[in-house]
Image: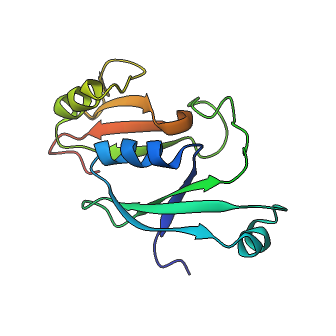
């Protein structure tokens, strides 16, 4: 049986840029390393695979984000940032003050897909944005009475 969610892997084209972006969200860099090409090829089944990874941790979560940069151009999914596509679509972060978080990220040059929206059913406030390489992210502020 599964004991827990261990990590979320995100493949990026620019590891340093992606690390800087997630630092804006309060993540701290953890373990990082070049991956042995023979090991990576056996693991992924991708001939000639090369890569480097860095783990990121947030003090409010037990889930680790693992950023992975393959040595060669992996190719970009042009529809990656679309919310209506099949598969893993976005990563959501709960925030305490969505206005302050959005303001801080805007000051750092981050653009959002819309103004902050409120889901009338629960009062949850949320907004989408694109992270490194167009990955879709959500910021969500929950009212105190709503069970997350």
The outermost residue toward the top is 115
- The reply to whether residue 122 is visible in this rendering is yes
Q: Does 22 appear above or below 56?
A: above
- Report the quarter where the N terminus lies: bottom right
* Residue 73 horizontal side relative to residue 88, left or right: right
Which residue is found at the position 38% from the left and 22% from the top? Answer: 111
- The reply to whether residue 135 is visible in this rendering is no
Of residues 85 and 71, the one drawn nearer to the viewer in this rendering: 71
The part of the image, by quadrant, that contains residue 140 is: top left
Which residue is found at the position 48% from the left and 64% from the top? Answer: 7
Of residues 35 and 137, the one drawn nearer to the viewer in this rendering: 35
Which residue is found at the position 59% from the left and 29% from the top? Answer: 82
Which residue is found at the position 65% from the left and 34% from the top? Answer: 85
Of residues 142 and 25, the one drawn nearer to the viewer in this rendering: 25
Image colouring: rainbow
Residue 142 image position (x, y, % from top left): 23, 41
* Residue 145 horizontal side relative to residue 141, left or right: left
* Residue 66 horizontal side relative to residue 72, left or right: left
Residue 55 image position (x, y, % from top left): 44, 63
* Residue 74 horizontal side relative to residue 92, left or right: right
Residue 116 image position (x, y, % from top left): 29, 23
In the rendered picture of this protein, how many numbered marks are placed on residues? 0
Residue 143 image position (x, y, % from top left): 18, 39
The part of the image, by quadrant, that contains residue 76 is: top right
The part of the image, by quadrant, that contains residue 13 is: top right
Q: Does 116 appear above or below 125?
A: above
């Amino acid at each position: 049986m599964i004991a827990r969610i261990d990590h979320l892997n995100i493949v990026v084209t620019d590891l340093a840029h992606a690390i800087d972006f997630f630092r804006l969200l309060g993540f701290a860099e953890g373990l990082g390393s070049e991956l042995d090409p023979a090991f990576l090829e056996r693991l992924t089944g991708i001939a000639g695979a090369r890569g480097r990874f860095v783990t990121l941790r947030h003090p409010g979560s037990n889930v680790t984000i693992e950023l992975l940069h393959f040595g060669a151009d992996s190719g970009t999914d042009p529809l990656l940032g679309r919310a209506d596509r099949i598969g893993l679509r976005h990563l959501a972060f709960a925030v305490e003050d969505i206005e302050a978080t959005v303001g801080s990220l805007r000051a750092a040059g981050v653009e959002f897909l819309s103004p902050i929206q409120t889901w009338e059913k629960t009062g949850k406030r949320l907004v989408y944005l694109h992270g490194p390489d167009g990955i879709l992210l959500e910021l969500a502020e929950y009212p105190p009475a709503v069970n997350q």
